[in-house]
Amino acid sequence: MYNCAEDVLAHHDEEVTLLQADRDTMRERRNANRDRLKKGLAAKGKPALREFKSQGSYAMKTMVQHPEKDYDIDDGVYFDKEVLVGERGAEMTALQARQMVRDALDDGSFNTPPEVRKNCVRIYYTAGYHVDMPVYRRVTTKDIFGNETYHYELASSSWKRSDARDVTAWFEKENTAQSPDTKNGRQLRRITRQIKKFARSRGSWSGQILSGFGITKLVTERFRANSDREDQALYDTMKAIRDRLNYDLVVAHPVTPNETITNGDEDPKSRFLRDKLTEAINNLAPLFESDCTREKALKCWDKVFNTDFFIGREKADAGLEAKSALAAPAVLAAGMVASAAAAAESAVRKEGGGRYA
């Protein structure tokens, strides 16, 4: 396979991984919403929350650049079960908990009011960002000896046992265990970002292809590490995921038993990802030909990611070489002039002329 390892890594660093400015903006808005929610709950006489916890791709650090800045930040809101009491003293339902959070956030400062959705409260921003705030309750139980244990439940269609922090911990464990390196987020995380970027490379694929969470799970299942070749690790992982989807389109949830990320045995989004990976693998076939050139290889990677980034690196390199070639005669000429001048000065000194006269 033609070696484009440096180019694939550069693509990750420049075109895939989230820009620091976007990270800072999302962090500022996350923190602003946290303050807004705490103040809103207090102003309306509602229960105080226990804590916040970032989750999803934001917490796993697998978010990728998006041309329309359609970034999904997940920030979990946690309450103790005991404080979530309705108006008549009854236990607050999952819907009521989400409505309470929505009302506390809606202080009139948003163009689009916060919205209650199935698993969260969503806050929209005109720049393309949106923040999802899932609502959880902490349930504490005691055994016969008085020892306390607790678990978390998500306010979904009903209260459902779940805690997204478990997903973050799972991914960090996989990333540490499987990556052959420790730099730049580790290789498994980088490959996850690259394949998520591929899945977002065409606007027409939106809504048809498997979710970023599903892709993340598949990468951990079929990751093919390569400490020497970033491009080989990416290609081999893409191929391994495609082969896996050829015989099974179901993607299991990584931490919740008996749950799946996909929908049914013939999930159309898994099938769509499989088919697009097949196209990408076919587009990279010329890299295995004995007469493959750098230009041809870079164009193949451009086709996979629907970009001109890779061939742009080749043009930039060619431009630097041309500039260097043009500069060489001038440097040589300058050197000859300097040598001639030095020789003339030496001759004057020997003859006693010039400033020594």
Image (spheres, grey):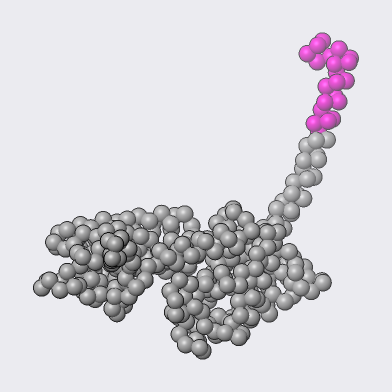
Locate residue 118: give its quadrant: bottom left
What residue lies at 47% left-to-right and 67% top-to-bottom?
66
Quadrant location of the C terminus in the rendered image: top right
Locate residue 75: give its quadrant: bottom left
Q: Is residue 142 left or right of residue 228?
A: left
Q: Is residue 202 visible?
A: yes
The x, y position of residue 294, in whole percent, is 74, 65
How many numbered tags mark residues here? 0
The x, y position of residue 1, in whole percent, is 75, 69
What residue lies at 65% left-to-right and 76% top-to-bottom?
239
130 and 120: which one is in front?
Answer: 120
Q: Is residue 279 visible?
A: no
Residue found at the far left of this picture? 88
Q: Is residue 227 left or right of residue 125?
A: right
75 and 172: which one is in front?
Answer: 172
Residue found at the far front of this picture? 145
What residue lies at 80% left-to-right and 15% top-to-bottom?
354
What residue lies at 62% left-to-right and 56% top-to-bottom?
181
Residue found at the far top of this picture? 357
Q: Which residues are magenta?
A: 337-357
In this rendering, the answer to whether 141 lies above or below 23 is: below
The x, y position of residue 171, in whole percent, is 50, 64
Q: Is residue 299 left or right of residue 142?
A: right
